[in-house]
Structures are given as C-alpha cells and as structure tokens.
Image (spheres, rainbow, N blue to C red):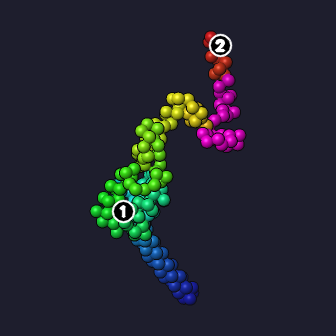
Amino acid sequence: MEKTEQKKETAKKEERADEKKYKEEREEKKEEKASKKEIMHEDLTRILGTDIPSTVPVYAGLTKIKGISWALSAAICKEVGIDKKRKVSTLTEAEIEKITAFIKNLSKSVLPTWLFNRRKDTETGEDKHLISTELDLRREFDIRQMKKIKCYKGIRHSLGQPVRGQRTRAHFRKGRSIGVARQKIQKPAAASAAEKK
C-alpha cells in the first residue's frame, strides 16, 4: 500500500511540475506575441499621405504610394540621389521632403514621359503623373465621361460588363442572372400587378 501511495504522490508532483511548465510556456508565448505586435506596430513613415513601414527599402516603400510603379520608384531614387536599398527608417526629414517635392513635380522633371500614368491628357494635352486620390478621382471622371458620351467602353461600364474584350460566356456571371428562387418570387408578383391593371 505504501508503494501505491508513493506512486500517487509522485504522480501528483509530476502533474504539478507539468502544470508549472505549461503555465511558464504560455506566459513565454504571450510575451513573444506581445513583442511581435510591438514589431508590427513599429514606426511608420508618412510620405504623401501613405504610411510606409520603416523596415522596407526605399525602393519598395515608394511603391506603396498609389500611382508609383517599381520603375518610377527606381527612377525617383536615382534622380533624388538616394540609395534604393536603404531602409525607410534611415531617411532624414530633409530627404523625405526632397522625395515628396520631386514626386509632386514629376511632370516638370527630366524623367521620360513613358513613366507617367496620364500622357496627353484629354483636357490639357499635357503629360501628367497622378498619385493617390487624384488618380482615383480622375479615373472616376473618365468613366463618367465615357458613360455620358455613350462610347462602347462607357456602355460596358454602365452595364457592369467587362470592358476590355473578355469573353462572358463562362466568366463574369456573378450577380448578372436571376436565380431560380428569385424567378418564383417574381412570377406571382408580376401576375398580381397584371391583375391590378
């Protein structure tokens, strides 16, 4: 009997030790998660209204700004004189201001026009480069203009169909057709409307 009691006591001690280890491991994991969250919420650098993580290189960070491609990002780094492999966190305020000023005046820079996203603007005829909200607004205005003049692209936009010549037999079917359940509901409603007339 004493052996069984001793075995029970040692088993209880082992369970307690296991519980302590388990609790310690959980606390360690919580601390790791907290440190990861701190890393994730680390410094962000704001350039032209866009938050850029400080851990990425300047070359990749500039592409986070809507309207700046990889090629344009490389050209900006070269023209401004900043190494594109440098981290965004190492940029000084003066360098950030220099980048911002250069991006705002891209159309007046020495960059080739094929890098711009709005060449030969329909209203002014100038070569421009639009960024962030300007780009969104101009795109919306262009679509609205196409709908207004009822060109083919405008008609496709207004119908909610693909604009660039894609086939529609198998794709672009979501939300277009009336399902079986809807037809059952609409038939009695149509019949009652006809009776009222």
Q: Amino acid at mark 1?
A: Val
Residue position for label 2:
195
Q: Residue furthest bottom?
A: 3
Which of the two marks, 1 or 2, is nearer to us in this view?
1
Could you tell me residue 197's position as x and y percent?
Answer: 62, 11
Query: Measuring 42% from the left and 43% from the top, which residue is drawn there?
Result: 126
Observer able to see residue 85: yes
Q: Main secondary structure of the magenta part?
A: loop
Q: Residue at x 49, y 33 (%)?
A: 145
Residue 75 counted in the magenta span = no
120 relative position to 108: left or right: right
- Amino acid tagged 2: Glu
Residue contact at pointers 1 and 2, CB within 8 angstroms: no
Residue sitting nearer the eye, 159 or 18: 159
The residue positioned 69% from the left and 33% from the top of the image is 180
Across and down, in percent, residue 133 comes to: 40, 45
Is 184 drawn above or below residue 29 in the view shown?
above
Judged from the image, the secondary structure of the residue bearing numbered disc 2 is helix
Q: Residue furthest left?
A: 94
Q: Nearer the viewer, residue 9 or 154?
A: 154
The span picked out in magenta is 162-187
Residue 80: which disc?
Answer: 1
Quarter holding the N terminus is: bottom right
Front residue of 22/56: it is 56
